[in-house]
Amino acid sequence: MDMRKLEKEIAQITASHGCTLYDFADLEGLTPGKLAKFHRGISFVYQMEPWVMDQLAQGPTDAYSVLYGQVNLRIDALAAEVVRALDRTGHEGWALPSSTRSDPVNIRGDFQHKTAATRAGLGWVGKNCQLLTKPWGPWVRLGTVLTDAPLEPVKPIEKSLCGKCTICIEACPAEALKGGSWCPGVERDVILDAWACDRYKKTHFQQFHGGHNCGICTQACPVGQKVLRK
């Protein structure tokens, strides 16, 4: 199949699911183990409701918990339809779950949504260890479909745009953010103590998706806050 036709179909699917920010990533050599056959990624970004995100200064709220679940369902539905479209063209697709830890010991999934998103030119990893987009900062949720289809990738983002800002680090009640700056290949431990973050969430916010949510550093980000000022 002509890749331009496939890319057009993917654009139509994303639009039908209300996703306005997505693109294609070159993941050659980055996907591990059973996923190594997938050398491309389709990365999706959904904006979260700004008024909900602005309420997270003290932690997650009921409104955020509901929105989080709803957007995850939208991401998974979009990813499933894209996989079906790839299948119709004779290509394989594999949808990363929107929010699943396949390795709970190391607090990781099968592949990082953030890696696909930076490789798709959609944003950079901030000092809060989350993807920051130019239009919405970290006030987003991510989805990813891995594929063997030779889609035309865009130029990746390979530099943090956080500069000297440390607002998210100062806001973190778990003191889990280490102040490191992201670049491709940097280890997570340079930026985040994932275990300190996880312990705090499970201790203080167990009622919200089993202690999987916090959002305090997300709310504090000035790139997200500018959405409200607009």
Image (tube, rainbow, N blue to C red):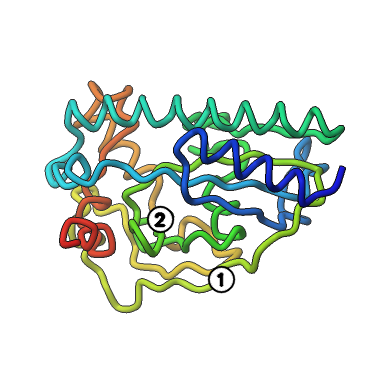
Q: Nearer the viewer, residue 81 or 94?
A: 81
**Image quadrant where residue 102 sits:** top right
Element on which disc 2 rests: loop
**Few, some or many C-alpha atoms within 10 Å of disc 1 (few <14, some 14-19, many ≥20)?**
some
Q: Which residue is mark 1?
A: 158
Disc 1 residue type (three-letter): Glu
Q: Is residue 80 above or below residue 128?
A: above
Q: Is residue 224 left or right of residue 129?
A: left
Compared with 197, 165 (above or below) is: below
- Residue 129 tag number: 2
Q: Image point 21% across, 51% down: which residue?
A: 219
Say whether residue 14 is left or right of residue 196.
right
Please tell me which of labels 2 and 1 falls first in the chain.
2
As shown in the figure, which amino acid type bears the numbered disc 2?
Answer: Cys
Left or right: 32 as drawn, with respect to 80: right
Q: Quadrant of the C terminus?
A: bottom left
